[in-house]
Image: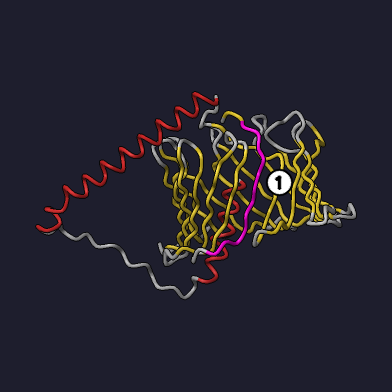
């Protein structure tokens, strides 16, 4: 869900720049000419070659898996994270885990002088309720969340407070019988509904999310596409008039993400992230580039691996 909310924020920002955008032209179906038909065998050869190369890569990775014992259905859980800009470190984060090995109970972030600049602490309040606090270098609370989960461990309600204990926002989640998110709602601190999302599933996968204003009018919607392995490869945001606002594309190999691309309403590349794995997949390097290929940031993580 965190990923979904991040995507919602991205689309919301792009909506502001899309107000005067005209409707996206629909692609027309053009009948194949005789020349196109003649060239088809060459294209088929190219596809066959690409498939052959893909199979070779899969065999190589299967061999690596057999040799190292690493399965490609693993997820990465960070232990440390170093951020760099222009080759220089800007911050370093250290993650500490308790009994729950997938979610940290403490995250410390330091600057280039190794001085603490932010601390995140997650602590249990009750059996199904936890508090996630963000503190500054002087141990003052900047903001905090009170999170309540259902019996399956999924978030039912999330309350956001500022450092003065004032309620800023409320998020609520409903789930269907299969345990999938059915609806998400957000309220302001006065408990006034701001907007809500409704989720649609096909073949067990979330294929569409409709976002409504408080009065029930469709504001925008999201279409999700998956590969044969169930990896989310494309998220597209549209306004209520079916105009494309933004796209987020992801490339996977054997369950691991290798590239993310973020495009605007004109399908022009805004920025992208490349992923590199090393040391038996225990290190992950995420490099962010602008649309024209300028390196913006590097994030290097030392990780633990767990089965999905």
Q: Does the magenta portion include 298? A: yes
Residue 31 in percent (x, y) is at 15, 58
Rendered-image quadrant of the C terminus: top right
Left or right: where 61 falls relative to 75: left
Residue 242 in percent (x, y) is at 40, 62
Using the rendered image of the protein, determine whether residue 166 is visible from the camera's viewpoint.
no
Q: Mark 1 points at which residue?
A: 158
Query: Residue farthest to the right?
Result: 138
User: What secondary structure is found at the residue carrying circle 1?
Assistant: strand
In terms of depth relative to the viewer, which is nearer, 229 or 251? Answer: 251
In terms of depth relative to the viewer, which is nearer, 73 or 14? Answer: 73
Residue pictured at 70% horizontal, 31% vertical: 101
**Dominant SS in magenta:** strand
Examine the image and state in which quarter residue 45 appears. top left
Residue pictured at 69% horizontal, 43% vertical: 157
Q: Is residue 136 above or below residue 25?
A: above
Left or right: where 25 falls relative to 153: left
Residue pictured at 51% horizontal, 32% vertical: 72
Residue 16 in percent (x, y) is at 55, 70
Residue pictured at 49% horizontal, 29% vertical: 64
What crowding class fits label 1: few (fewer than 14 Cα within 10 Å), some (14-19), or many (20 or more)? many
Query: What kind of colouring is applied to the model shown?
Result: secondary structure
In terms of depth relative to the viewer, which is nearer, 109 or 12? Answer: 109
Rendered-image quadrant of the N terminus: top right
Magenta highlight range:
294-305
Query: Residue farthest to the bottom?
Result: 20
Left or right: where 249 falls relative to 162: left
Residue 279 in percent (x, y) is at 60, 36
Q: Does the magenta portion include 22? A: no
Using the rendered image of the protein, determine whether residue 40 is visible from the camera's viewpoint.
yes
Left or right: where 94 falls relative to 179: right
Query: Residue farthest to the left?
Result: 34
């Amino acid at each position: 869900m965190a990923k979904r909310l991040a995507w919602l924020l991205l689309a919301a920002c792009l909506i502001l720049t899309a107000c005067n955008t005209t409707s996206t032209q629909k692609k027309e179906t053009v009948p194949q000419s005789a020349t196109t038909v003649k060239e088809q065998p060459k294209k088929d050869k190219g596809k066959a070659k690409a498939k052959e190369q893909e199979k070779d890569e899969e065999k190589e990775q299967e061999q690596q898996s057999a040799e190292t014992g690493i399965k490609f259905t693993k997820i990465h859980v960070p232990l440390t994270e170093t951020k760099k800009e222009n080759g220089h470190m800007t911050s370093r984060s250290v993650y500490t885990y308790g009994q729950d090995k997938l979610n940290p109970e403490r995250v410390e972030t330091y600057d280039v002088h190794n001085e603490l600049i932010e601390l995140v602490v997650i602590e249990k309040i009750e059996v199904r309720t936890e508090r996630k606090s963000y503190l500054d270098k002087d141990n003052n609370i900047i903001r905090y969340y009170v999170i309540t989960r259902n019996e399956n461990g999924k978030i039912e309600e999330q309350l956001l407070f500022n450092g003065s204990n004032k309620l800023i926002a409320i998020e609520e989640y409903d789930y269907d019988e299969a345990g999938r998110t059915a609806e998400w709602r957000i309220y302001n601190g006065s408990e006034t509904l701001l907007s809500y999302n409704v989720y649609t599933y096909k073949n067990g996968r979330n294929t569409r999310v409709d976002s409504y204003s408080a009065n029930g009018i469709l504001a925008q919607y999201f279409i999700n596409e998956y590969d044969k392995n169930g990896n989310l490869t494309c998220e597209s945001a549209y306004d209520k008039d079916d105009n494309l606002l933004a796209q987020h594309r992801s490339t996977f190999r054997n369950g691991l993400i290798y590239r993310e691309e973020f495009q605007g309403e004109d399908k022009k590349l805004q920025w992208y992230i490349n992923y590199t794995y090393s040391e038996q997949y225990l290190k992950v390097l995420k490099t962010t580039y602008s649309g024209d290929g300028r390196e913006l940031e590097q994030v290097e993580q030392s990780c633990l691996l767990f089965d999905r």
